[in-house]
Amino acid sequence: MLLITTALTTGALTLTACGSRGDGNKNGEGKTTVVIGLDAPTTGELSALGLGIRNSAQLAVDIANKNNEVKGVTFKLQALDDKALPNVGQQNATKLAGNKDVLGIVGPLNSGVAQSMQQVSKQNNLTLISPANTTPDLTQGPDWKKNKRVRQFPTYFRTATTDEVQGAFDGQYAWEKVKAKKAYVIDDQKTYGVGLASSFKDQFAKLGGKIVGTEHVSPDDRDFKAVVSKVKSAKPDLVFYGGEYPASGPLSQQLKDGGVTVPLMGGDGMYSADYIKLNKKAQGDYASSVGKPVEQLPSAKKYIADYKAAGFKEPYEAYGGSTYDSTWALIQAVKNVVEANNGKLPDDARKKVTDAMNKVTFDGVTGKVAFDKYGDTTNTMITAYQVEKGDWAARFSAPFKEFDKS
């Protein structure tokens, strides 16, 4: 997933990399403390997703400590709230990088926030792994559409597949499964929304669909009367929205109130229980999300049971499973580094952890976890959901490349 671009000054990003670790971070049990940072919006409009991310990372840390996953190491989670703002995410990354015990950061939720954190991560040899970022530029560079793909940051990884995959999946699903022939496309002018809408348009048109109109809105807009009028005149079979649920919920309801009775479709930024809470007329709307519903995965049964037993007040939401896998990937990288160094963390632990991340592979909550040469997940599974009786119901799951074989 997701979001937000603002101009940022990066002149003060350079920090001194970790020096010798020695035994200065031994805890009371004689174990070495390794801190895993967490950056997500735990307050504000996107907090439903952010809290699920925070809780799932905490669960992974707790399970690792309980099972003594890395001998001689105790893990601790340091969770910071980025409020879905790039400048705050940058500040959080800088703060976490300044703590020599932090060997990696899980997060962020938003792609625009990730853009502000990646340079800090690189300059400090600090692994950054997101369970939710989907903008292709983050890993493959701005020219990926020209097939000039270059890895941008060796310290950045993600367990969510990209909008190149998700947007194309949405376009194909709209054409082949929804049977839409005409689509009106709206985006919120942010990194995530623009990229997702562009990929949708390309695939939908490639298959023979007609784009009958496009519109750009502000993510802060809640009054869509002018947009509703334009959409109604265009008479689409489907409206596609590139953006997130705080705006798409009201947009959908106002479209229906205004006589546009076709479904609204969006990506993982729309896939939240809060979308339905914000929209009394959500019935029939569609959203895609990366991966497969954890409730349908045998590999996720233990995670779901453990999450429930932990007593978290908030649900794990869309990115719970991928967050657990992101955190566990960091834990496995630390484990590999410790085992390769006679049971101790080396002085250059951060760099060694980043190097180890490239080789990490395991059977996770969401399936096989591994990373390609760009730091992207090798799991390209996407699921289409539809609102039915006040809840999201899974309709179709497939890796995009195998869409027409499913």
Image: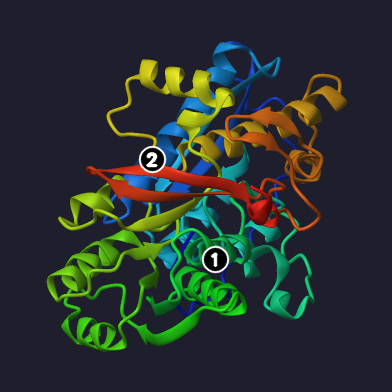
**Quadrant of residue 314 within the rendered picture:** top left
Q: Position of residue 46 (x, y in %)?
A: 32, 54
Q: Which residue is mark 2?
A: 317
Q: Is residue 150 above or below residue 335?
A: below
Horizontal side of residue 10 vs 149, given as left or right: left
Q: Which element carries disc 2, helix, strand or loop?
A: loop
The three-letter amino acid code for the residue at tag 1 is Gly
The mark found on residue 167 in the picture is 1
Mark 1 or mark 2, earlier in chain? 1
Work out how far the residue at label 1 is from the one at label 2, CA to CA, in angstroms: 21 Å
Q: Please tell me which residue is depicted at 29% across the width and 68% down the height of the picture.
A: 262
Q: Is residue 98 visible?
A: no
Where's residue 278, x and y in %? 19, 56
Question: 384 or 28, which is in the foreground?
Answer: 384
User: Residue visible at 57% across and 64% down?
Assistant: 163
Tag shown at residue 46: none
